[in-house]
Image (cartoon, rainbow, N blue to C red):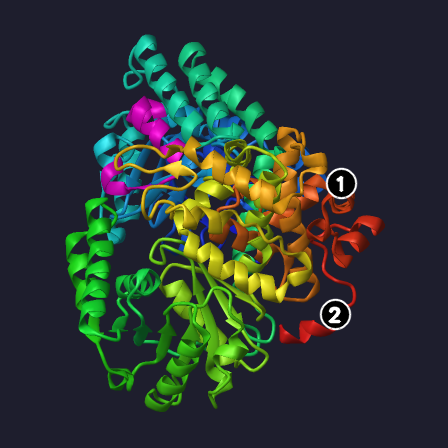
């Protein structure tokens, strides 16, 4: 903690410059908050101090409150570890202090950092500084007065938008809105801020206490209308998350009863939210995502990632064009290889459509789009891959084809070139069977659409070199993905863990449960859509191909449902042709297609698993459990076999790859909140009623019996952990 401090320097001009030191982002750790109180009190009492400037060291104002404190509170349940910042520091010491203060903002002022700046009497910023209140993304809300001061400075609508979306704005926009008083070059920031503070002290500039401003809020009826619209939007976009509505309630409290009442309510509700399951889940995912960058025997042995300037993508279909798009957007040269000019043209057009789509949605400026498109070159021959640093094969899931491609690229590409495959299920040892350079073979499993989905599953075999893993991790980060390193098996970590998801849904349907009820309950739990709508979306061909892979790999626990084959026979192919379990029409939401019910009845007749030929009765919660507990069970096998480095890696992968609700903390974290005992007993009961698919794994049984959390590290690593 030696570098964590708050300093104060008083200049000949009578301005005390208080500086936060806590690299890299000057997080507001407990010692920093104590230091701010101490220095501010000293500055207030000193006769040679006329005014105060608050800033951060190293070109960053402050990234906000130290989230490690939340983690400690979650571990102990002791809320008293949270300091009283809002009233004691920001209101009493800073805003209502006897000497004016100016925030000199550079780099970023986020969360508690921005709230400190709001407590000052003016804010001067450098160009392109980030300003935001992202607390809702951690399951809490602004807790140092942000819910009250931001609306008073920039107006209610924009303040609500900034808080609800957790997205920062730049200082230039902040200036237009009234959040920032002036923008000056970094080199002038302190000089201008000092003079501004003196001007306030000498009444040449206004001494504004933002908590007392009311001119930008509008009338109560206008404010109520804004908040009513916000509540309606939140009910659609943030289901199961209490912090959004709580934040709106606190904003409203301040508008009706005054800013100080709002601050008091904010402080109370903030503490309640910190202890919520939502905050526990989101904070866990935050730290779990950070941990993925630490891989034993890869990131800790002194290796440095090599520069990857040029990548060949083999196959320009949906996945290949998406991968090429992601690479081009990060200014990496891409060679897109296809088997004929027709397919190549389609692939190039798909890349262009991806990039133009980002421009249309205002997520990419036109000049960056043009530059990205210029990074991609088409090719019909492997000889164009002779100078690439990496190859990513992204053709269909066909073993002989993949083996042939790997044999050819190994002959053409340079000896340092990484040989990656985007397979989603096939064992890498089989794909690379005919190659000599087995240390360069690695899985680069993207999720569709590859240029948007944030997860990159990096799959290593026992022979993959640490250098190849490190290089691919660096590429993943460069293209704005979260790389999670996993071991090699059928389906790897994510698809292997989630293969029982659709299977459990098919068992329920064949036991007589309504398809649309299942989808509704899974959506209520927090996934974007239910398993049957997801099957419609991905296409039935994928379901058949993946089903065969898992059926042969895990024949002891797969359920063979005839339903997909029956749907295909009836001319359905989900969203691809507009007809599946749902009807898909352009510009309309999918709606149930009840003409599918006789096909489902035929499937039930063929499987003949309904007890006594009658549909079973299950409650809503049991539907969720019968689908997700088998997923947890498979996750336990993945942990037991050492397919992931740590349990939290599987949490991150489930959130980013399968859209498992982040506020539930990921699949293992959620399972631990439910309790291994309840999961084990439920699976045991269902396995006795409905067969081996539900049979609890050895790992789950052991943890449940001994009362050990599923996330706890293994005390004695299994033999297969050598792959990691």
- The magenta region covers 151-174
> Residue beneath label 2, please?
718
Which of the 4 image quarters holds residue 48? top left
**Is label 1 in a helix, a strand or a loop?**
helix
Comparing 64 with 44, the one in front is 64
- On screen, 158 above or below 665? above
Which of the 4 image quarters holds residue 505? top right
**Residue 293 location, x and y as percent?**
52, 64
In front: label 2 or label 1: 1
Q: Residue at x 63, y 38 (%)?
A: 511
Q: Classify residue 523 as left or right of residue 306.
A: right
Q: Classify residue 327 as left or right of residue 612.
A: left
> Residue beneath label 1, please?
678
**Residue 191 location, x and y as percent?**
27, 46
For the question of whether residue 67 can be seen, the reply is yes
- Within 10 Å of disc 1 (Cα), the crowding (few <14, some 14-19, many 20+) is few
Mark 2 vs 1, N-terminal side: 1
Asked if the magenta segment contains residue 593, the reply would be no
**Is label 2 in a helix, a strand or a loop?**
loop
For the question of whether residue 63 can be seen, the reply is no
- Within 10 Å of disc 2 (Cα), the crowding (few <14, some 14-19, many 20+) is few
Comparing 132 with 368, the one in front is 368
**Which residue occupies the extreme right position in the image?**
706
User: How far is the residue under mark 2 from the one under mark 1?
Assistant: 25 Å
By secondary structure, the bulk of the magenta-drawn segment is best described as helix
Q: Residue at x 41, y 80 (%)?
A: 418
């Amino acid at each position: 903690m030696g570098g964590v401090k708050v300093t104060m320097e008083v200049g000949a001009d009578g301005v005390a410059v208080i500086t936060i030191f806590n690299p890299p982002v000057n997080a507001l750790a407990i010692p920093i908050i104590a230091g701010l109180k101490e220095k501010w009190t000293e500055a207030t009492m000193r006769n040679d101090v006329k005014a105060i400037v608050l800033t951060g060291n190293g070109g960053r104002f402050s990234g906000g409150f130290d989230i490690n404190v939340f983690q400690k509170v979650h571990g102990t349940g002791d809320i008293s570890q949270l300091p009283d910042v809002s009233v004691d520091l920001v209101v009493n010491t800073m805003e209502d202090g006897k000497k004016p203060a100016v925030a000199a903002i550079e780099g970023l002022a986020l969360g508690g950092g921005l709230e400190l700046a709001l407590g000052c009497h003016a804010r001067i910023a450098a160009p392109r500084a980030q300003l935001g209140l992202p607390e809702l993304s951690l399951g809490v809300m602004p807790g140092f007065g942000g819910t009250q001061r931001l609306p008073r400075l920039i107006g209610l609508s924009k303040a609500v938008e900034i808080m609800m979306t957790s997205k920062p704005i730049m200082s230039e926009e902040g200036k237009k809105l009234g959040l920032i008083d002036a923008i000056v070059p970094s080199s002038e920031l302190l000089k201008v801020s000092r003079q501004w503070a003196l001007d306030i002290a000498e009444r040449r500039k206004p001494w504004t206490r933002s908590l007392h401003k009311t001119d930008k809020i509008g009338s109560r009826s206008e404010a109520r209308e804004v908040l009513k619209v916000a509540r309606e939007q939140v009910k659609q976009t943030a289901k199961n998350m209490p912090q959004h509505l709580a934040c709106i309630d606190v904003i409203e409290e301040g508008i009706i009863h005054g800013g100080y009442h709002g601050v008091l309510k904010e402080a109370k509700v903030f503490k309640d939210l910190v202890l919520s399951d939502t905050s526990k889940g989101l904070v866990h995912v935050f730290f779990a995502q950070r941990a993925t960058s630490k891989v034993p025997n890869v990131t800790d042995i002194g290796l440095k990632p090599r520069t990857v300037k040029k990548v060949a993508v083999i196959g320009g279909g949906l996945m290949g064009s998406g991968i090429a798009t992601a690479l081009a957007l990060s200014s990496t040269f891409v060679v897109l290889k296809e088997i004929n000019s027709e397919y190549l043209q389609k692939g190039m057009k798909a890349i262009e459509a991806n990039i133009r789509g980002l421009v249309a949605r205002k997520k990419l400026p036109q000049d960056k789009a043009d530059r990205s498109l210029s990074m991609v070159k088409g090719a019909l021959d492997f000889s164009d891959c002779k100078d690439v640093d990496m190859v990513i094969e992204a053709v269909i899931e066909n073993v002989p084809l993949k083996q042939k491609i790997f044999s050819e690229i190994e002959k053409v590409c340079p000896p340092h070139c990484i040989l990656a495959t985007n397979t989603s299920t096939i064992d890498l040892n089989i794909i690379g069977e005919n190659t000599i350079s087995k240390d360069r073979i690695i899985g680069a499993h993207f999720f569709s659409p590859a240029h948007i989905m944030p997860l990159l599953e990096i799959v290593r075999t026992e022979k993959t070199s640490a250098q190849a893993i490190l290089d691919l991790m660096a590429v993943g980060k460069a293209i704005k993905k979260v790389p999670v390193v996993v071991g090699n098996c059928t389906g790897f970590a994510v698809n292997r863990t989630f293969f029982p998801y659709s299977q459990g849904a098919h068992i329920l349907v064949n036991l007589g449960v309504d398809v649309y009820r299942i989808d509704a309950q899974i959506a209520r739990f927090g996934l974007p859509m239910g398993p049957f709508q997801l099957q419609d979306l991905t296409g039935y061909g994928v379901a058949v191909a993946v089903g065969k892979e898992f059926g042969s790999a895990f024949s002891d626990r797969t359920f063979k449902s005839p339903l997909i084959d029956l749907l295909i026979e009836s001319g359905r192919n989900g969203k691809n042709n507009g007809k599946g379990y749902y009807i898909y029409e352009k510009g309309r939401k999918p709606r149930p297609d009840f003409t599918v019910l006789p096909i489902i009845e035929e499937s039930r007749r063929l499987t003949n698993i309904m007890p006594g030929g009658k549909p079973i009765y299950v409650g809503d919660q049991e539907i969720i459990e019968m689908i997700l507990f088998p997923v947890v069970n498979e996750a336990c096998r993945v942990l037991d076999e050492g397919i992931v480095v740590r349990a939290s890696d599987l949490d991150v992968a489930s959130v980013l790859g399968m859209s498992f609700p982040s506020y539930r903390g990921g699949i293992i974290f959620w399972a631990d909140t439910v309790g291994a005992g309840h999961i084990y007993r439920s699976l045991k009961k269902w396995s006795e009623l409905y067969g081996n698919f539900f049979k609890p794994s050895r790992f789950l049984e052991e943890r449940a019996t001994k009362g050990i959390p599923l996330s706890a590290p293994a005390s004695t690593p299994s033999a297969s952990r050598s792959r990691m």
